[in-house]
Image (cartoon, rainbow, N blue to C red):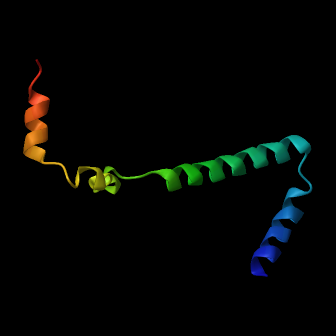
Amino acid sequence: METTLRINELIDQISPLNDQSKILLISMIKKMIDRKQVEKKRHLITDLSGLGSGIWKNVNVDSFIENERQWD
């Protein structure tokens, strides 16, 4: 309920603005939202830890590396 009241107060303040100012305000609000979305999507490299470990579960690492080192 409090949020609705605050939004209504903002609308009352925005109403007198001309259309160009309202469009500018909308653009600024959209940029704020877009920035938040980008921040939410950021991941740390450490988030990848253990990813794909199931693929290597039954692989002998020493044999795999030895095979990779043979280039002939």
- Which quarter of the rendering shows the C terminus? top left
Question: Looking at the rendering, which quadrant does residue 15 occupy?
Answer: bottom right
In the rendered image, residue 58, in percent from the top left (x then y), is placed at 20, 53
Q: Nearer the viewer, residue 28 or 58?
A: 58
| Residue at figure coordinates x 89%, y 64% from the top left | 12
In the rendered image, residue 32, in percent from the top left (x then y), is placed at 64, 51
Q: In the drawing, does residue 62 fall left or right of residue 47?
A: left
In the rendered image, residue 8, in percent from the top left (x then y), is placed at 85, 70
20, above or below 46, in the image:
above
| Residue at figure coordinates x 9%, y 25% from the top left | 70
Q: How many marks?
A: 0
30, above or below 15, in the image:
above
25, above or below 4, in the image:
above
Q: In the drawing, does residue 42 fall left or right of residue 1?
A: left
Q: In the drawing, does residue 39 fall left or right of residue 50?
A: right
Q: Extreme top residue here?
A: 72
In the rendered image, residue 53, in percent from the top left (x then y), is placed at 27, 54
| Residue at figure coordinates x 62%, y 48% from the top left | 34
| Residue at figure coordinates x 32%, y 51% from the top left | 52
Q: Nearer the viewer, residue 20 or 35?
A: 35
- Which quarter of the rendering shows the N terminus? bottom right
